[in-house]
C-alpha cells in the first residue's frame, strides 16, 4: 500500500451464488486475509445447524418464533425465505461497523441483496459467483456430504432460478479456480475502496491542502 489512505465510508460487500459455488470458502479466505480488514455479517437462520458449523460463527441458529420477533421489531436489515428456511441480517452489527468506517462482508441471496441495495444504495457492492458447470455444482454439493439427496435436489433446482439473477449484480465471476477467483475478489475490493464517491469529503480536504501549499 502506498501513501496514507483517505478516510471513507464503510463498504457493504455482498457475495451471492447458488449453494455449492464456493462462496463460503471464498468468504473465509477474504476474512482470513488480515490486510483486507473485513468483518463478516453473521446472519440468523431457522435452518438446522450442519455438523461442521458453529453457532455464532457461521450463523446464529434461532427458531421461527425468535426470527419472527426480530423481523417484527425491525432488527433485521433484510430477510428472506431461501430453500425451506428463513435467513436474515441483524441490523445492529452492520450499523456499528459501518459507522466506524469498516467494510462488512455479506453472504446473502439475491432477495436480500435487493433489499440492502434499496436501503443502502451507493455503499453496496454486489458480486455474483457462477459455477464452471452444472455437473461440477452437483459434484460439489455431493462431495460436501452434509445435505440429504432431497436437499441437494432442491438446491440444484434453485440454482437454476438464482443464476438468472446475474443482471442484478455489479460483478459476475465464474469460480473455476478458487485462487484465481480470490485474486479477482481482492482486485474488486481494492478498486471499490478507491472510488471517490466514498471519500469525496476527504478528497476535497486533500485537494484544498495541496492548493494551499506554498509552491515548490
Ligand atoms: P446455506 O443454507 O447453504 O448456508 O445458505 C443458503 C442460502 O441462503 C445462501 O444462498 C446464502 O447466501 C443465503 N443466506 C444466508 N444468510 C442470509 C441472510 O441473512 N439473508 C438472505 N437473504 N440470504 C441469506
Image (tube, helix red, strand yellow):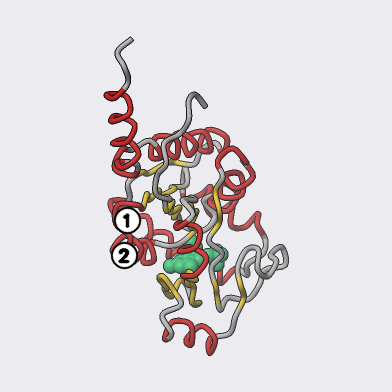
What residue did someone put label 1 on? 164
The answer to whether 45 appears left or right of 17 in the picture is: right
Query: Residue at coordinates 57% horizontally, 35% vertically from top-left?
Result: 179
Q: In the rendered view, tell whether residue 30 sits above or below residue 51.
A: above
The numbered disc on residue 23 is: none
Q: Is residue 24 visible?
A: yes
Local SS, label 1: loop
Q: Position of residue 201 (x, y in %)?
A: 31, 42
Image point (28%, 36%), residue name? 204
Alpha carbon distance from label 2 to label 1: 23 Å
Viewer-nearest residue: 194 or 134: 194
- Whether residue 154 appears in this view of the structure is no
Q: From the top left corner, tell me how far across and down residue 215 is, in percent.
A: 29, 13
Asked if residue 134 lies left or right of residue 162, the reply is right
Q: Secondary structure at mark 2?
A: helix
- Whether label 1 lies within 8 Å of ligand 1 gets the answer no
**Which residue shows up at 53% across the image and 47% down it?**
136
Q: Is residue 91 above or below residue 174?
A: below
Residue at the (60%, 68%) spot, across then down: 59
Identify residue for label 2.
119
Residue 120, picture quadrant: bottom left
Q: Nearer the viewer, mark 2 or mark 1?
A: 2
- Mark 2 Cα shell of 10 Å, populated few (<14), some (14-19), many (≥20): few
Q: How many marks?
A: 2
Apparent side of residue 34 relative to residue 128 in the rendered image (left or right): right
Amino acid at each position: 500500500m502506498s501513501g496514507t489512505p483517505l478516510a471513507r465510508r464503510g463498504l457493504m460487500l455482498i457475495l451471492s451464488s447458488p449453494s455449492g459455488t464456493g462462496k463460503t470458502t471464498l468468504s473465509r479466505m477474504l476474512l482470513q486475509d488480515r490486510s483486507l480488514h473485513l468483518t463478516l455479517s453473521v446472519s440468523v437462520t431457522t435452518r438446522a445447524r450442519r455438523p461442521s458449523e458453529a453457532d455464532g460463527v457461521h450463523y446464529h441458529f434461532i427458531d421461527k418464533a425468535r426470527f419472527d420477533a426480530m423481523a417484527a421489531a425491525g432488527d433485521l436489515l433484510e430477510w428472506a425465505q431461501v430453500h425451506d428456511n428463513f435467513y436474515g441480517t441483524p441490523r445492529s452489527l452492520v450499523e456499528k461497523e459501518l459507522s466506524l468506517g469498516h467494510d462488512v462482508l455479506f453472504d446473502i441471496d439475491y432477495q436480500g441483496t435487493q433489499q440492502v441495495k434499496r436501503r443502502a444504495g451507493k455503499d453496496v457492492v454486489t458480486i455474483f459467483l457462477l459455477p464452471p458447470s452444472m455437473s461440477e455444482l452437483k459434484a460439489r454439493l455431493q462431495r460436501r456430504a452434509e445435505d440429504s439427496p432431497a436437499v441437494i435436489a432442491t438446491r440444484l433446482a434453485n440454482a437454476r432460478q438464482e443464476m438468472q439473477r446475474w443482471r442484478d449484480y455489479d460483478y459476475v465471476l465464474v469460480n473455476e479456480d478458487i485462487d484465481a477467483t480470490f485474486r479477482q475478489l481482492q482486485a474488486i475490493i481494492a478498486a471499490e475502496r478507491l472510488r471517490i464517491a466514498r471519500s469525496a469529503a476527504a478528497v476535497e480536504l486533500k485537494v484544498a491542502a495541496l492548493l494551499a501549499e506554498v509552491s515548490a
